[in-house]
Image (spheres, rainbow, N blue to C red):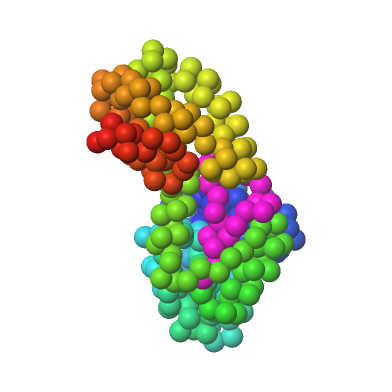
Amino acid sequence: MGSGKLAGFLAVSLHSAGFKITEIIGRDVPPSLRRARVLAKKVGARAVTANSAVLDASLIWFCVPDGEISAACAGVADRLANHAEHQLRFAFHSSGALLSRELQPLRRSGVAAASVHPFMTFVAGTRPSLKDVPFAIEGDRAATQVARQIVRALGGESFSLAAKRKAAYHAWATMSSPLLLALLVTLEEAAGVAGLTPDDARRKSLPIIRQTLANYEKLGPARSFTGPFVRGDTTTVAKHLAALKVNPEVMEVYRALARGAIKKLPTKNQAALKQILE
């Protein structure tokens, strides 16, 4: 259910992995139905609405915004109530923040439910590989077993997530991509203080960013850490802060990251560095 970015990516990936998709369920509005028809054609399925869906599959995967999952699930459950011989046995949703209990109406119809969230970013115009991508899984035992099999077929890796950890998990995921982008935008602003345009800053920053990530992957954070904090160079850090005073928001991000570096990474002259950052 759904025809947006995530639905489009998952449906094509599932189809390519050999799974049969019977229906793409879109909202009963022209833009959603157009997207559903395009996606359905790609995967050999029917484009339908919630009211016209036959629901002849063993699994329904909700790929709709978080705020719509509960209502969409309730609508499907109402349809099933009039079809005692339905084939639906499993239901997934892919919210990173919400639990499988959003699918409770279907559980009452005997359907096993799970939340299955890929730890990956999906944006228009890109097609990331699912190879080795972790999927966080939480829910009923029968549904999580099926989810693991599907994730394995997609080339990903699955791990179990306790319900009480879901919000913290999603905070981690948010820091890993959208808030990482917020940091990168702040880097552009810092470069602006040095006289560069955002486009120039992006182009010039990417080599060192890529190498830092490669070092992090190969060596871990401590051995990848370089610069004035490793040396305990208070003079240079003081110059940084003085230069960034013209942009208080950038300076505050610098201070926050620097405090984290002093606390978590190998640094010299910590007391003096802390004093400068106050």
Asked if one can make out residue 145 in the rendered structure from this viewpoint, the answer is yes
Q: Residue at x 66, y 57 (%)?
A: 156
Q: Nearer the viewer, residue 96 or 6?
A: 96
Question: Whole-percent x and y of residue 214?
Answer: 62, 37
Q: Main secondary structure of the magenta part?
A: loop
Seen at 35% across and 17% down, the residue is 193
Left or right side of 251 for 160: right
Taking the image as shown, residue 138 lies to the left or right of residue 270, namely right
Stretch of the chain drawn in magenta: 117-138
In the current view of this chain or complex, which residue is farthest to the right? 18
How many marks the image carries: the answer is: 0
> In the displayed structure, would residue 204 be above or below residue 48?
above
**Near-viewer residue (70 or 77):** 70
The one of 254 and 228 positioned closer to us in this rendering? 228
Q: Is residue 185 visible?
A: no
* Image height of 240 relative to 112, above or below: above
Q: Quadrant of the C terminus?
A: top left
Give me the residue at 46% from left, 30% from top.
Answer: 231
The image quadrant of residue 252 is top left
Q: Between residues 140 and 25, which one lies in front from this camera angle?
A: 140
Residue 245: x, y in percent?
A: 26, 23
User: Is residue 176 covered in magenta?
Assistant: no
Residue 253 position within the rendered picture, expressed as x and y whole percent measured from the top left: 33, 35
- Picture layout, residue 77 above or below residue 122: below
Residue 8: x and y in percent read 58, 51
Name the residue at 48% across, 81% down. Answer: 107
Relative to residue 7, is residue 232 depicted above or below? above
Residue found farthest to the bottom: 84
Q: Is residue 151 left or right of residue 239?
A: right
